[in-house]
Image (cartoon, coloured by chain):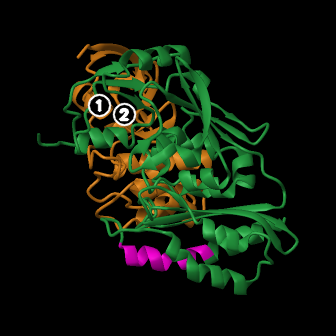
Chain colours: A orange, B green
Amino acid sequence: MKKIPIEFSINGQKREALVNPNDLLINIIRDELYLTGTKYGCGIGECGACTVFLDNEPVLSCLTLAAAVDGKEITTIEGLANGNELHPMQIAFLKNAAVQCGFCTPGMILTAVALLKENPSPTEEEIKDYMRGNICRCTGYVQIVKAIKACAEGGKSEPI
Amino acid sequence: MQTDSKILAQEFEYLAPKTLDEALDLLEKYKDKNIKILAGGTDLLVKMKTINLKVNYLMNVKNISELNFVDTEQGLRIGAATPLSHIIKEEKVKVKYSALYEGIMSMAAPAIRNMGTMAGNLGNSSPAADTVPPLIAYGAELKLQSKRGEHTVLVEDLITGVGKTIMKPNELITEIIIPEINKNTGSAFLKKSRVKADLSKINLAIYLEREGNICKDCKIVFGSVAIKVLRAEKTEELLKGQIINSELINKVAEEVSSEIKPIDDIRSTAEYRMAMSKQMLKDGLELAWARAKD
């Protein structure tokens, strides 16, 4: 296999890498760049744990070739906060106890941020529909939906 | 070989053409050397990981900007590398092509729709593909290009079996062309699946043209009920030129299951699919008929 030189930006930083054709984006992010917020769940596009932004749209890094991100912009969960200031969605997840074991949380938060970008005031049904590719095995989803709603309303609703 | 979904174990060469010309050259060059086209990768990479589908050359078409467009001027023309999520953002798709909009919205989840393409859904040619029934219902065509020329074929004639198409190894789907539809038409897409993000146990697209209370023309297309997506042509004939009322809808629904050939598989049973086809036809006809009113 011929190695492929790629250039991309991740969380605002320019990077260069020499990757194999069969390297997956998730493994470059976790094992080479040590950004372990992005999680490996199912590896076949069912669970959403490996969600990252590629040119500002959520995609699954377990089904994206590293070579295919040449020239593109990636944002992982680590790039969402502004320095020490958490993103409003991160605050909403914390305030509403939308995190239990935390494994699905990075993917959940990124997908939720994408939802509000497309639809700033979603109904509960719209939230559930948009989040359907992100699976959580502990919370039962109630607090996750609540957190997203709270964030959409500018954090006005009372935390539980 | 043991499969591991964390990594992509098999080795292959990666090709990333920036123009259509370059892509067609590469297809010509490697057509006998097991080249596969990568668009979203949401099916292909899964197969390479889980069932060890062998690929020697993987050609990514996502960087070809001339294949990434939605042209709404006359009907719909959709470039082969356009992500599914960009297609449903078009107002015209949402307003006029309800079955296509509903079909795409029913697929997987937003992240997958940001990656996957309609051409990929066609090339992958699964009997459960959710964009295929709507495309056939609208009489859509697709453009196939190779170094030696181009031709258009009906989507209906593309797929010949599970994972099988009439495409030659040097051909690339470059564009999907959906005809303009009139005002007095209505369409709908229905799907049954275990959970919303899942693949279809059975799906259905209906397109009809209405003149007062008469059905002038219609197409009824079922997915996941045979080795390929199929049209219920007998049912179509029973509806054409007829006054549509609940009596007729009930009558044709009773007959429709004789036109499909479902099997028992991991997602559902033949019995369930037969039973659901009746109710889905009723619901779909009522919905498309009501939409044709406006």
**Residue on which disc 2 sits:** A64
**Residue on which disc 1 sits:** A24
The answer to whether residue A90 is visible is no
Mark 1, other Cα within 10 Å: few <14 / some 14–19 / many ≥20: many
Q: Is residue A35 left or right of residue B85?
A: left
The residue stretch that appears in magenta? B269-281
Q: Which tag, 2 or 1, sits closer to the chain's start?
A: 1
- The residue closer to the viewer here, B117 or B227, is B227
Residue A74 in picture, x, y percent from top left: 43, 29
The answer to whether residue B188 is visible is yes
Q: Is residue B94 left or right of residue B56?
A: right
In the rendered image, the quadrant that contains the N terminus of chain B is: top left
Relative to A87, say whether B285 is above or below: below
Disc 2 to disc 1: CB gap under 8 Å: yes
- The residue closer to the viewer here, A86 or B277, is B277
Q: Is residue B274 within the magenta segment?
A: yes
Look at label 2 and name its amino acid: Thr
Q: Is residue B174 within the magenta segment?
A: no
Residue A53 in picture, x, y percent from top left: 45, 36
Residue A33 in picture, x, y percent from top left: 27, 25
